Image: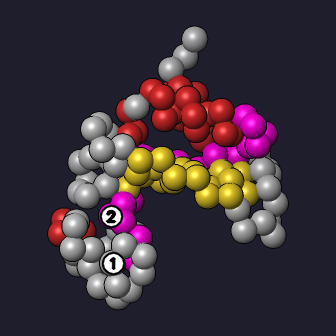
Amino acid sequence: MPKPLTILRKKAKRGDQGFPRATLAYYGPDDKQATKAVLGIFRNQEDEGTILRYLSDDKDIRFKIETQKTILAQLQEHAVQSLIIREQIFGCPHEEGIDYPSGESCPQCPFWEGRDRFA
């Protein structure tokens, strides 16, 4: 049986297959280790989405088989047709306005201060 990460990549490579759609992004204290995965599932264009968060303190979450299996199970449960994955770490795992004040840099992740994660 193929590894879960291989299955996720293949699903993403298929491109837009319509709804339901999902996005998968990884976050971490720097650009080397992801400690958080965020899966967004959208049933249709008007849907605000279901957001699921997965956390890891001991290992890069992108390579945790248990997390990959859980994400695959969610995709199957919601009959997701299209998947967009950003495998590079997208930014700090802490949430602005929740974990630290809006408009400021995260005090726990100095690596991301002043960096444009969209560039």
SS under mark 1:
loop
Name the residue at 34% across, 48% down: 35
Crowd class of label 1 (few under 14; some 14 to 19; many from 20; radius 10 Å): some
Q: Is residue 92 above or below residue 4?
A: below
- Examine the rendered structure and indicate whether residue 89 appears above or below residue 63: below
Q: Is residue 65 left or right of residue 56?
A: right
* Residue 14: quadrant of the picture: top right
Question: In front: 82, or 53?
Answer: 53
**The one of 77 and 2 positioned closer to us in this rendering:** 77
Q: Which residue is mark 1?
A: 100
Going from N to C along the chain, the mark reached first, 2 or 1, is: 2
Specify whether residue 86 is painted magenta. yes
- x then y, percent, for residue 81: 75, 42
Quadrant position of residue 30? bottom left
Q: Amino acid at mark 1?
A: Tyr
What residue range appears in magenta? 76-96
| Viewer can see residue 56 | yes
Residue type for callout 2 = Cys
Magenta stretch: residue 67 in it? no
Q: Label 2, on which residue?
A: 92
Residue 28, image quadrant? bottom left
